[in-house]
Every structure is written in structure tokens, then in C-alpha cells.
Image: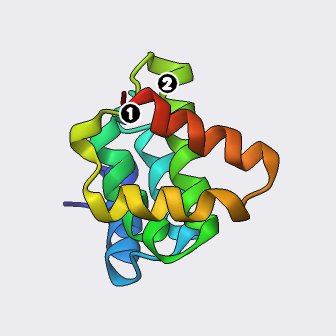
């Protein structure tokens, strides 16, 4: 793929490679997620891509858990797509539940929204 001919796709590919190198890096996940909003002038983001970008971050840290929840909330606000239960494995659900008590009130609300949306 020529970088000059497809700069947005090349940038997205580079962001994905950076995320693949360190899947717990919340900054890389946020950049990749933001990049998906402008692929070919379209927002191609979906719940599956939230999981792709943020799952490992959410398993690794509170910051990652909140980033995953915020990405799902953003997706819902832009497209109406809610978190689907089939996207969440037991390990991820356990991480969300485990971190809830340690989050600030605002962050608790958004993570609780993700959990409740799947029911």
C-alpha cells in the first residue's frame, strides 16, 4: 500500500501495528479507535472493534477499563449500538466487575452502563 496514495489507511495500519506491539497501551488503543472514525471518510467503528482496541487494556488496568467503557458509550451515542454480551468473555466481565469499587463515581456509572446494556 502506497503511503502517498492511501495516507489514512497507512496511518491506521501503523496505529494497529503499535497497538499489536503493546495491546495494554491505552494511548495506542485510543489513537487506533480515533483513527477508525475516519477511514475513507466514514466511521467504521463497531462493538467488535471496541473489543479489539481496548480488551487487553481493560484486563490490564483501571484506566483501560474506563477507556473501553467510554469507547462503547461514544459508539452508542454516535450509532445507537450498545455493548453486546457475546463480545464479552468471562475474563473481561470479571475485570469490569472487579474494578468497579475502585473507580470514581463518574467512571463507575459508565462501566455500570456497559454491564447493564448487555442484559
Q: Residues within 10 Å of mark 1 (few under 14, many from 20)?
A: many
**Residue, far top:** 80
The residue wearing badge 2 is: 76
Q: Is residue 119 left or right of residue 63?
A: left
Q: Is residue 74 left or right of residue 36?
A: right
**Quarter of the N terminus within the rendering:** bottom left
Q: Which mark is residue 83?
A: 1
Does residue 14 appear anywhere in the picture?
yes
Q: Are marks 2 and 1 in contact (CB under 8 Å)?
A: yes
Q: Is residue 77 above or below residue 69?
A: above
**Quarter of the C terminus within the rendering:** top left
Label tally: 2
Residue 55 position, x and y percent, is 38, 61
Colour style of the rendered protein structure? rainbow
Examine the image and state in which quarter residue 62 appears.
bottom right
Residue 113 position, x and y percent, is 56, 33
Q: Residue at x 44, y 28 (%)?
A: 117
Q: Nearer the N terminus, badge 2 or badge 1?
A: 2
Residue 92 position, x and y percent, is 36, 60
Does residue 31 appear anywhere in the picture?
no
Residue 58 position, x and y percent, is 48, 65
Examine the image and state in which quarter residue 27 appears.
bottom right
Amino acid at each position: 500500500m502506497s503511503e502517498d496514495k492511501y495516507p489514512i489507511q497507512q496511518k491506521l495500519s501503523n496505529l494497529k501495528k503499535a497497538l499489536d506491539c503493546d495491546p495494554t497501551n491505552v494511548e495506542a488503543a485510543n489513537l487506533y479507535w480515533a483513527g477508525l472514525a475516519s477511514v475513507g471518510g466514514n466511521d467504521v467503528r463497531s462493538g467488535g472493534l471496541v473489543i479489539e482496541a481496548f480488551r487487553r487494556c481493560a484486563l490490564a488496568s483501571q484506566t483501560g477499563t474506563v477507556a473501553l467503557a467510554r469507547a462503547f458509550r461514544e459508539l452508542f451515542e454516535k450509532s445507537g449500538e450498545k455493548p453486546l454480551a457475546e463480545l464479552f468473555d468471562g475474563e473481561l466481565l470479571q475485570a469490569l466487575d472487579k474494578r468497579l469499587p475502585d473507580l470514581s463515581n463518574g467512571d463507575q456509572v459508565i462501566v455500570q452502563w456497559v454491564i447493564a446494556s448487555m442484559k
